[in-house]
Image (cartoon, rainbow, N blue to C red):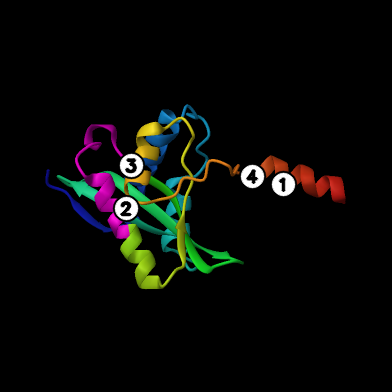
Amino acid sequence: MSYTIRVARREDMKQVLQLIQELATFEKEDDAVEVSVQDLEEDGFGKQKLFHCFVAEKNEKIVGMALVYPRYSTWKGAVIHLEDLIVTKDMRGTGLGTALLDEVVKYGNDLGVKRICWEVIDWNEPAIGFYESKGAKVMRDWDVVQLDAAGIKNYLSAIA
């Protein structure tokens, strides 16, 4: 299978957004994606770069991506968070996910981070098995906690 892994460019963001939407559909959250191509372009390539992205390209089409950003652990120090590793459905099982994860791990190592962390939905057993086969520790005793935009507004109005 012939594909190229490279650092994403601004002009890739339309196809990256399509992959993000494909993941949302897979996770049964079709309407959850609020980010736009313009958001991705500004946030990834603007004055304040908020993320770093790798893409997998085959025949001039983006067929996979991995998006990371910096975090800080009070226990470990500098870490990166892998927000999403997405491989389009027809490219799964080709080694593309491994190639993307390889780039993320090399990138984190080059940065000198102490940890790379990410979440995986609990029913996605193929992804869990994939990550565990790579030596990742799936911490099933932790829950993800979030405040969405409405939750932030509600929180602030309750303390005002």
Name the N-terminal-most of marks 3 and 1.
Answer: 3
92 within the magenta span: yes
Depth-wise, is mark 4 or mark 3 nearer the camera? Answer: 3
Q: Looking at the image, which is closer to me, 111 or 132? A: 132
Q: Are marks 3 and 2 in contact (CB under 8 Å)?
A: no
Asked whether residue 93 appears in the rendered view, the answer is: yes
58 within the magenta span: no
Q: Position of residue 53 (x, y in %)?
A: 36, 57
- How many tags in the picture? 4
The residue labelled by disc 3 is 130
Q: Position of residue 24 (x, y in %)?
A: 45, 34
Depth-wise, is mark 1 or mark 4 nearer the camera? Answer: 4
Q: Secondary structure at mark 3?
A: helix
Q: Which residues are magenta?
A: 87-103
The residue labelled by disc 4 is 146
The residue labelled by disc 2 is 101
159 left or right, relative to 98: right
Name the N-terminal-most of marks 3 and 2.
Answer: 2
| Amino acid at dot 3 | Phe
The residue labelled by disc 1 is 152
Within-10-Å neighbours for mark 4: few <14, some 14–19, many 20+: few
Q: Secondary structure at mark 2?
A: helix
Name the N-terminal-most of marks 1 and 4.
Answer: 4
Quadrant (top left/top right/bottom left/bottom right) for the N terminus: top left
Name the N-terminal-most of marks 4 and 3.
Answer: 3
